[in-house]
Amino acid sequence: MQKCTLALGCFWKPEENFKNKLGIMETEVGYAGGQSSKVSYEEVCKGNTGHAEVVRLSFDEKKISYKKILDLFFKMHDPTQKDMQFPDVGTQYRSEIFYETDEQKQQAEEVLNEKNKDYEGKIQTNISRIKNYCKAEEYHQKYIEKNR
């Protein structure tokens, strides 16, 4: 089982989309890429922590490849938008692939370069080593309570 972490705007819809794909064993929403290993939803929304809203996937590479996940990633959002996914605006809504291993980094670069041909060089997606991931527990709990 492998993990990958992807930022593609607000995390709820991507989580729901990935949850139903064959080979995705678990999904989790959170924040990654910022200066601290623990942040709240409110802090991230202020836009000065450096974190992006992310969906973290655990997947069975025998059923779905990392490259297939990245292909889905590019289909689920507009990677040409910088620091936003309309109507959500801010650096926390940026497009970013957070890699766990050098192999994931290489594959992410290959897929991005290939997709960038289709988008005429306009892709704004970042590729970065995963850092300071934290689960969005308090926001997730509030969301569950609000929607009961």
Image (tube, rainbow, N blue to C red):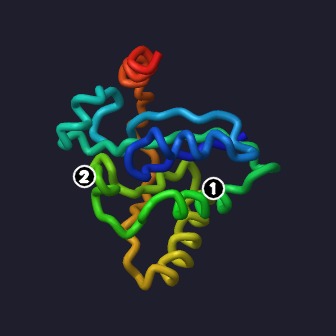
Kindly identify which residue carries mark 1. 69
Q: Residue at x 69, y 42 (%)?
A: 24
Q: Is residue 36 above or below residue 96?
A: above
Give how far across and how far down residue 136 sits, in percent.
41, 28
Kind of residue at badge 2: Val
Q: Which numbered disc, 2 or 1, marks the residue that appears first in the sequence?
A: 1
> Residue 16: which quarter of the image?
top right
Residue 38 position, x and y percent, is 33, 27
Residue 105 is situated, as x and y percent measured from the top left of the image, at 54, 60
Query: Which three-letter amino acid code belongs to the residue tagged 1?
Result: Ile
Tell whether 16 sits left or right of 29: right
Location of the N terminus (image quadrant): top right
> Which structural element holds mark 1?
helix
- Give me the residue at 69% from left, 46% from top: 21
In this view, the residue in front, 2 or 26, is 26
**Frontmost residue, 105 versus 12:** 12
Secondary structure under the numbered disc 2 in the rendered image: strand
Q: Residue at x 58, y 52 (%)?
A: 101
Q: Give the crowd class for mark 1: few <14, some 14-19, many >=20 residues within 10 Å.
A: some
Rounded to the nearest whole Å, what is the CA distance between mark 2 and mark 1?
24 Å
Q: Which mark lies nearer to you, 2 or 1?
A: 2
Q: Quadrant of residue 140?
A: top left
- 123 to 91, vertically: above or below: below
The residue tagged 2 is 89
Count of all numbered marks drawn on residues in the image: 2
Pick the residue in front: 57 or 98. Answer: 57
